[in-house]
C-alpha cells in the first residue's frame, strides 16, 4: 500500500500540525475544513509554523516553499476522493467521526486507509461504521505535532497487516518515532495523562495550592516542560472535558470523572489557549492566572 496522497480532515490545533508535517515530509496534502473562515485560520497557523521553522534554521526557505506548495485546502469532502490515506482530526465525538468515515467510505477508493487521531475513542467503533474495517487504524499524534516525536499507531482486531504496516511506515516517513498501542480508550499516553490532569484540577478545587504553584510544582519538582493546568489550556479545555467524559463512560472509574470546575469552564466558553482564556489568560505576552472562585 503506497501512500503519496494524504487527506487531513479538520484544520484545528492537531489537523494543522498533521498537515504541516505531512507536507514537509513530501506528501501531497488536501486539508478539509467546514468553512472558509476556518480554512483561513488553519492556513495561517500552518504558514506561521513553517515560517517560524525557517526562521529558526530548521527548514530552508526553499523547503518551506515546497512544503507550502504541497498543501491544498477545501471545504468539499469530495476533494478527498483520490487520497491514499485520510487522517481525521475533528471534534472528539463518536457521532461526528462515524458520520465522516461513513461519507468517506462511499467516496474514496477501496484501498484508501482511514486513520483517526482520536485521544480517547475506540478505533474499533469507527472501523465498524465503514465497509472497510480492515483498513482503519489509529494514528495518535501529540501536540504540538511538529515538535512531539511520538505517534501511537493503533490496530483493531480487524486491521490488516498491510494497512497497519503502511500506517506505521507513514508515521516513520514523517520523522516520528511510533509505538504500537492496543485499541483501548486512551491508548498508552492518555491512560496515564488524563487522570493526572484531572487530579490537578481537583487539587485546585480543593485549594491545595494556587494555580501557578500547582504548575510550578510539576515543572520545578519533576522537570515537566509544562505544569498540568497550563497543559490543559494547551490541549484545549473543551477537548480535555470530552476526553474525560469518554474515558469515564468507558471505564466507570472516578479517576476519569470530569471535575465540576472543568465542566463550568466549558459552559463559560473558556477553551484555553486556542480562544485566549482557560485557566490562564493568554492574550498577553505571558499567561496570567484567571480568577475562578468567588471574590469579595
Ligand atoms: N509548532 C511548531 N513548533 C513549536 C511549537 C508549535 N506550536 N511550539 C514550540 N515549538 C518549537 C519551537 O520552535 C522550539 O524549537 P527549537 O528549540 O528548535 O528552536 C521548540 O519547540 C521549543 O519551543 P519554545 O522554546 O518556544 O518553548 P518551550 O521550550 O517552552 O517548548 C513545548 C514548548 C515544546 C510546547 C514544551 O513546552 C512542551 O513540550 N510542552 C508539553 C507538551 C505536551 O505535553 N504535549 C502533549 C499534549 S497531550 C496530547 O497531545 C495527546 C492528547 O490526546 C490530548
Ligand atoms: P480543534 O477544536 O482545535 O479542531 C477541530 C477542527 O475540526 C475544528 O476546526 C472543526 O471546525 C473541524 N471539524 C469538525 N468537524 C469537521 C468535519 N466534518 N470536517 C472537517 N473539519 C471538521 O481540536 P483538536 O485539538 O485539533 O482535536 C482534534 C482531534 O485530535 C480530537 O479527536 C482530539 O481528541 C485529538 N487530539 C487532540 C490533541 C490536543 O492536544 N488538542 C492531541 C492529540 C489528539
Image: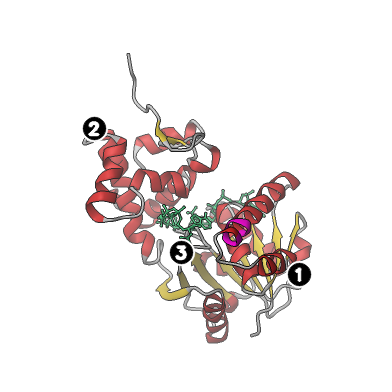
Using the image, determine if residue 266 lies above or below residue 250: above
Residue at 71% from the left image edge and 48% from the top image edge: 40
The magenta-colored residue range is 50-54
Q: Quadrant of the C terminus?
A: top left
Query: Circle 1 sits on which residue?
Result: 81
Front one among 126 and 227: 227
Query: Circle 2 sits on which residue?
Result: 207
Q: Is mark 1 within 8 Å of ligand 2?
A: no
Give the numbered dot on residue 148: 3
- Is 166 on the left-hand or right-hand side of 258? right
Front one among 168 and 122: 168
Residue at 61% from the left image edge and 66% from the top image edge: 87
Rendered location of residue 188, percent (x, y): 36, 66
Q: CA distance from mark 1 to mark 3?
A: 30 Å
Residue at 43% from the left image edge and 48% from the top image edge: 240
Front one among 165 and 219: 219
Q: Main secondary structure of the magenta part?
A: helix
Where, by quadrant of the figure, is residue 207 drawn? top left
Determine if residue 54 is in view. yes
Determine if residue 257 is in view. no
Using the image, determine if residue 200 lies above or below residue 205: below
Q: Is mark 3 within 8 Å of ligand 1?
A: yes
Check disc 3 and report its element: helix, strand or loop: loop
Amino acid at each position: 500500500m503506497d501512500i503519496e496522497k494524504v487527506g487531513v480532515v479538520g484544520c484545528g490545533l492537531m489537523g494543522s500540525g498533521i498537515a504541516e508535517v505531512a507536507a514537509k515530509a513530501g506528501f501531497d496534502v488536501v486539508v478539509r475544513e467546514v468553512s472558509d473562515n476556518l480554512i483561513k485560520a488553519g492556513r495561517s497557523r500552518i504558514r506561521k509554523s513553517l515560517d517560524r521553522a525557517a526562521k529558526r534554521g530548521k527548514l530552508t526557505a526553499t523547503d518551506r516553499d515546497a512544503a507550502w506548495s504541497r498543501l491544498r485546502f477545501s471545504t468539499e469532502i469530495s476533494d478527498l476522493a483520490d487520497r491514499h490515506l485520510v487522517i481525521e482530526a475533528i471534534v472528539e465525538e463518536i457521532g461526528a467521526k462515524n458520520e465522516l468515515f461513513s461519507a468517506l467510505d462511499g467516496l474514496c477508493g477501496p484501498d484508501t486507509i482511514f486513520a483517526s487521531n482520536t485521544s480517547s475513542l475506540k478505533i474499533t467503533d469507527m472501523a465498524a461504521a465503514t465497509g472497510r474495517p480492515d483498513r482503519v487504524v489509529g494514528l495518535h499524534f501529540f501536540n504540538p505535532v511538529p515538535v512531539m516525536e511520538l505517534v501511537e499507531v493503533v490496530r483493531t482486531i480487524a486491521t490488516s497487516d498491510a494497512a497497519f504496516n503502511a500506517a506505521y511506515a507513514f508515521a516513520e516517513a514523517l520523522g516520528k518515532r511510533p509505538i504500537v498501542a492496543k485499541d483501548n480508550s486512551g491508548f498508552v499516553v492518555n491512560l496515564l495523562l488524563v487522570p493526572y490532569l484531572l487530579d490537578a484540577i481537583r487539587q485546585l478545587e480543593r485549594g491545595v495550592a494556587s494555580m501557578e504553584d500547582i504548575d510550578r510544582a510539576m515543572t520545578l519538582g519533576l522537570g515537566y516542560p509544562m505544569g498540568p493546568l497550563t497543559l490543559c489550556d494547551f490541549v484545549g479545555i473543551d477537548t480535555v472535558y470530552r476526553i474525560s467524559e469518554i474515558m469515564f463512560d468507558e471505564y466507570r472509574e472516578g479517576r476519569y470523572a470530569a471535575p465540576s470546575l472543568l465542566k463550568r469552564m466549558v459552559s463559560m466558553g473558556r477553551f484555553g489557549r486556542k480562544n485566549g482564556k482557560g485557566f490562564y489568560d493568554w492574550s498577553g505576552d505571558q499567561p496570567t492566572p484567571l480568577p475562578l472562585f468567588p471574590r469579595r
